[in-house]
């Protein structure tokens, strides 16, 4: 047998094996992609990209794991324990970048919508009935998920601004979702910033009244990449392409398409009827970064001494675009 014929037969045999076992061979060539996510429809594009196979098509074997809060994910993604974090901007992110950790903000998700208020500030009903409004919250106990450097704190700051108040003018309380109803019932909090479905539920229970929401068109939630993607632009672009396909599928009323709803239920663990009834966030199909919010949050937290470094970090240090 000639050398050329031997090579031909070997190549043919390999081709036949690939044809016979395409799934196994493709699986071996896919890159693992560890994604940590906060269980919220703010990250609908991530869930849809996973469930519709967009990550697989892009060459990834994606593994999604829930994380408690966005701030917790910054060290995980910077240290390479996860490759991607679907979480909110926070003081923890700015501090991580300032310390030289390898993490960048690459996309914004879950814009505050033009219609409806999935995230909002509520005042305890008895206080609201007694005349308390946003302008009277100075010195009052205001609760939200996370610490003083969380995205919720920033949204509260945006609500307080028109009334001439700052975050430091209120007493901040970290109240997780499971404890919020009890906090209102026991009058342990005067006002509460929360998200759907609790915004509607607490009003229906006559525990609180919605008084304000963050400005529409801003987004403090998004996607963060760690070292494995930041050091490989081709791989990072592939991951972003999958995420953008997911985002394109949830624009407008397509958000409520049955396969999408199934994905939200799977990853958020919220009941289907609750998700369908709750106001939805807006999404951009290109997952563009809300640069204004990225910069304004840093300014807000610097002004309130939540961030203590100087001068502000510039875009080059905070952002990567793929």
Image (tube, grey):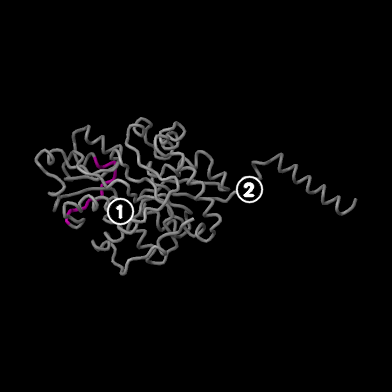
Density class for disc 2 (Cα within 10 Å; few <14, some 14-19, many ≥20) is few
Q: Is residue 164 above or below residue 25?
A: below
CA separation in Å, label 1 and label 2: 39 Å
Density class for disc 1 (Cα within 10 Å; few <14, some 14-19, many ≥20) is many
Query: Which residue is at a point 26% across and 35% down the rendered structure image?
Result: 200
Label located before the other in sequence (1 or 2)? 2
* Stretch of the chain drawn in magenta: 169-180
Query: Please, what secondary structure does the residue beneath circle 2 have?
Result: helix
Would residue 310 appear left or right of 25 to someone viewing this image?
left
Q: On the image, which quarter does residue 169 sit in?
A: bottom left
Query: Which residue is at a point 24% across and 42% down the rendered structure image?
Result: 180
Q: Is residue 21 above or below residue 153?
A: above
In the image, residue 179 lies in the stretch drawn in magenta:
yes
Query: Which residue is at a point 79% across and 45% down the rendered structure image?
Result: 12
Q: Which mark is residue 86?
A: none
Q: Give residue 67's position: percent from left, percent from top.
A: 40, 48
The residue tagged 2 is 28
The residue tagged 1 is 150
Q: Give residue 208's position: percent from left, percent from top.
A: 19, 38
């Amino acid at each position: 047998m000639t050398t050329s014929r031997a090579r031909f037969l070997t190549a043919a045999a390999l081709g036949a094996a690939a044809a016979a076992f395409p799934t196994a061979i493709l699986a071996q060539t896919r890159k693992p992609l560890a994604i940590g996510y906060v269980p919220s429809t703010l990250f609908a594009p991530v869930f849809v990209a996973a469930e519709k196979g967009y990550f697989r098509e892009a060459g990834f074997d994606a593994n999604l794991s829930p994380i408690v809060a966005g701030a917790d994910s910054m060290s995980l993604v910077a240290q390479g324990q996860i490759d991607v974090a679907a979480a909110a901007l926070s003081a923890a992110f700015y501090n991580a970048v300032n310390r030289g950790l390898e993490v960048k903000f690459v996309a914004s998700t879950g814009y505050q919508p033009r219609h409806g208020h999935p995230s909002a500030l509520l005042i305890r009903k008895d206080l609201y009935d007694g005349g308390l409004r946003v302008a009277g919250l100075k010195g009052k106990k205001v609760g939200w998920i996370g610490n003083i450097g969380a995205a919720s704190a920033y949204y509260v700051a945006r609500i307080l601004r028109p009334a001439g108040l700052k975050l430091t003018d209120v007493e901040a309380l970290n109240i997780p979702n499971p404890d919020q109803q009890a906090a209102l019932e026991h009058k342990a909090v005067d006002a509460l910033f929360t998200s759907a479905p609790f915004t509607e539920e607490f009003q229906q229970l006559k525990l609180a009244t919605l008084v304000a929401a963050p400005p529409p068109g801003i987004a403090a939630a998004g996607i963060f990449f760690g070292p494995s993607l930041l050091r490989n632009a081709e791989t990072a672009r592939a991951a972003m392409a999958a995420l953008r396909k997911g985002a394109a599928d949830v624009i407008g009323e397509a958000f409520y398409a049955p396969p999408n709803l199934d994905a939200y239920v799977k990853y958020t663990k919220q009941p289907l009827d609750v998700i369908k009834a709750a106001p939805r966030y807006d999404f951009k199909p290109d997952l563009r970064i809300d640069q204004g919010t990225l910069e304004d949050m840093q300014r807000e937290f610097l002004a309130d001494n939540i961030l203590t470094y100087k001068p502000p970090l510039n875009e080059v240090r905070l952002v990567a675009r793929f």
